[in-house]
Image: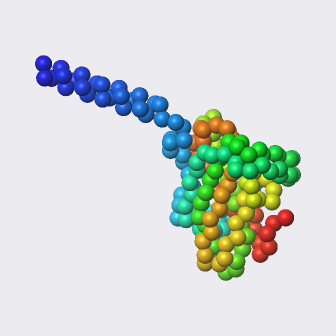
């Protein structure tokens, strides 16, 4: 009798655990992210993907909404964002190991559960689609934020890159 009770109890605990895991919202599912504590590279189609002197201290992805409306135009077209539109938000900290103070254009490749690349990056304070800009003094750290309009909650991975050569003036 005692053995049957133990087996029934363990079975119930197991089923409750499975139910709990299966009903968790997608935002709590682990996302494969870039390795913290490494230097960022250029994308493979720019400068052959070589390593930069921009050190990734940390980064995180979460789901949110835009807190204001704006439009952006670029080579790929014009985009409109409305306050409250759903988005992916990637925040992080970088360190500038160059000998000068620079503006860095940070971009990301973000993939959903179907393996499709999500984009473009449409960040409120970025001058154009495709990247965000952060000025970081030499030997200092800076915090960046990337936003991508997206209404799903199924992101499985992302990687970060430096989009262009660092500059002493902000990009247009």
Image coords of residue 96 (percent x, y): 63, 73
Horizontal side of 142 relative to 13 (left or right) equals right
Q: Nearer the viewer, residue 162 or 80?
A: 80
Horizontal side of 110 relative to 2 (left or right) equals right
Toward which corner of the image does residue 14 lie, by quadrant? top left
Q: Nearer the viewer, residue 99 or 67?
A: 67
At horizontal 70% and vertical 48% (from top left) the residue drawn is 66
Q: Colour mode?
A: rainbow
At horizontal 74% and vertical 50% (from top left) the residue drawn is 68
Q: How many marks?
A: 0
Horizontal side of 58 relative to 46 (left or right) equals left
As drawn, 116 above or below 39: above
Image coords of residue 81 (percent x, y): 78, 46
Classify the position of the C terminus by image quarter: bottom right
Image coords of residue 131 (percent x, y): 74, 57
Toward which corner of the image does residue 58 lie, by quadrant? bottom right
As drawn, 90 above or below 137: above
Classify the position of the N terminus by image quarter: top left
The residue at the far left in this view is 1
Horizontal side of 136 relative to 11 (left or right) equals right
Toward which corner of the image does residue 170 lie, by quadrant? bottom right
As drawn, 146 above or below 15: below
As drawn, 134 above or below 70: below
Is residue 43 visible to us here? no
Image coords of residue 108 (percent x, y): 67, 53
At horizontal 41% and vertical 28% (from top left) the residue drawn is 19
Is residue 71 visible to us here? yes
At horizontal 80% and vertical 51% (from top left) the residue drawn is 70
Q: Nearer the viewer, residue 130 or 125?
A: 125
């Amino acid at each position: 009798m005692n053995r049957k009770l133990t087996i029934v109890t363990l079975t119930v605990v197991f089923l409750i655990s499975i139910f709990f895991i299966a009903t968790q919202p997608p935002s709590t599912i682990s996302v494969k992210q870039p390795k913290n504590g490494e230097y960022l590279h250029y994308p493979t189609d720019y400068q052959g993907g070589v390593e930069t002197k921009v050190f990734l201290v940390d980064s995180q992805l979460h789901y949110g909404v835009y807190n204001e409306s704006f439009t952006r135009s670029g080579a790929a077209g014009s985009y409109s964002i409305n306050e409250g539109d759903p988005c992916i938000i990637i925040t992080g900290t970088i360190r500038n190991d160059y000998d000068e103070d620079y503006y860095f254009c940070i971009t990301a490749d973000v993939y959903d559960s179907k393996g499709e690349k999500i984009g473009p990056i449409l960040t409120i304070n970025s001058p154009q689609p495709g990247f965000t800009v952060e000025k970081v003094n030499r030997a200092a750290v800076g915090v960046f934020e990337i936003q991508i309009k997206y209404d799903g909650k199924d992101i499985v991975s992302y990687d970060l890159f430096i989009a262009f050569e660092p500059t002493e003036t902000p990009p247009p």
